[in-house]
Amino acid sequence: MASRDDTLAHIEQYVAEDATLTSARRAGQQADIGPIGAASGAVLRFLAAAIGARAVVEVGTGCGSSGIWLLRGMRPDGILTSVDVEPEYQESAREAYRSAGFPANRARLIQGNALEVLPRLTDSAYDLVFVDAVRTEYPRFLAEALRLLRSGGVVVFNNALDATPLSDGPLSASDPATSAAREVGQLVREDDTLMPLLLPVGEGLLAAILTPPTSE
């Protein structure tokens, strides 16, 4: 029987990266920003395609690997809005999108603090929001994502394995990032308007569908 590590390795290898994705991921690794792997990217592409995403928000542009996966799942006329505080990362991402064959008008890159940028975006206008940024801000990003999403839209958080409802021992104390991940996991799990799913790929993806309101 395969070990858990062997199984996860097979999952990572099931969908292979092409040269453009590999280059973008390696650029992210060199910048020490933890780019997503192929399995997590395949999930993003799958979700974007499954809901016919035309408008997507990405919090944390990185060097472009996650944006390529998202764009490859989105509709041909879809636009990715990606926010990052680091302009040099966005320059790398812009080059990665170009190398992947996407015209410049498919991606709107906004440089700035996401918690200042997201409130300026239109309510209920987006199909998918992907968050891969500072984990201590995840609960605040969730609130913004729920405002931005249309009914039936999907929010996804990366680095979410700590969102599991595990109890700490009496003498242990979670670091702020772990505490925030657990908080957002609880918020998603307890919100009746959300249909959640925690996927054990990469460092974990927490996804949730914003369900349509039920008629009385």
Image: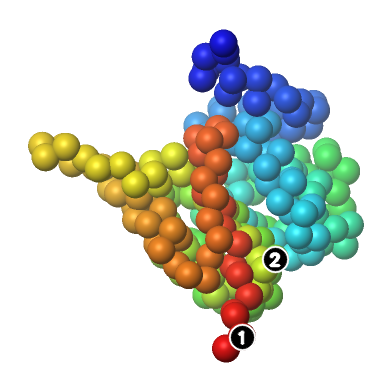
- The residue shown at (59%, 68%) is 210
Q: Which label is found at residue 127?
A: 2
The number of discs equals 2
Q: Position of residue 90 (x, y in %)?
A: 64, 48
Q: Position of residue 202 (x, y in %)?
A: 55, 32
The residue furthest top is: 1
> Where's the N terminus, which quadrant?
top right
Residue density around tag 2, few if under 14, some if 14–19, many if 20 or more, within 10 Å: many
The residue furthest front is: 216
- The residue shown at (65%, 25%) is 12
In this view, the residue in front, 216 or 118, is 216
Q: Which residue does the numbered mark 1 point to in the structure image?
A: 215
Q: Nearer the viewer, mark 1 or mark 2?
A: 1
- The residue shown at (37%, 57%) is 186
Would you say 29 lies left or right of 39 here?
Answer: left
Q: Amino acid at mark 1?
A: Ser
Is 214 above or below relative to 33?
below
In this view, the residue in front, 166 or 175, is 166
Q: Amino acid at mark 2?
A: Asp
The residue furthest left is: 171
Rounded to the nearest angstrom, the CA distance separating label 1 from label 2 is 22 Å
Q: Secondary structure at mark 2?
A: strand
> Where's the C terminus, which quadrant?
bottom right
Q: Secondary structure at mark 1?
A: loop
In this view, the residue in front, 153 or 7, is 7
Is 179 above or below relative to 12?
below
Question: Which is more N-terminal, label 2 or label 1?
Answer: 2
Q: Quadrant of residue 110?
A: bottom right
* Residue 112 appears in the picture as rendered: no
* Residue 197 appears in the picture as rendered: yes
Would you say 115 lies left or right of 80 here?
Answer: left
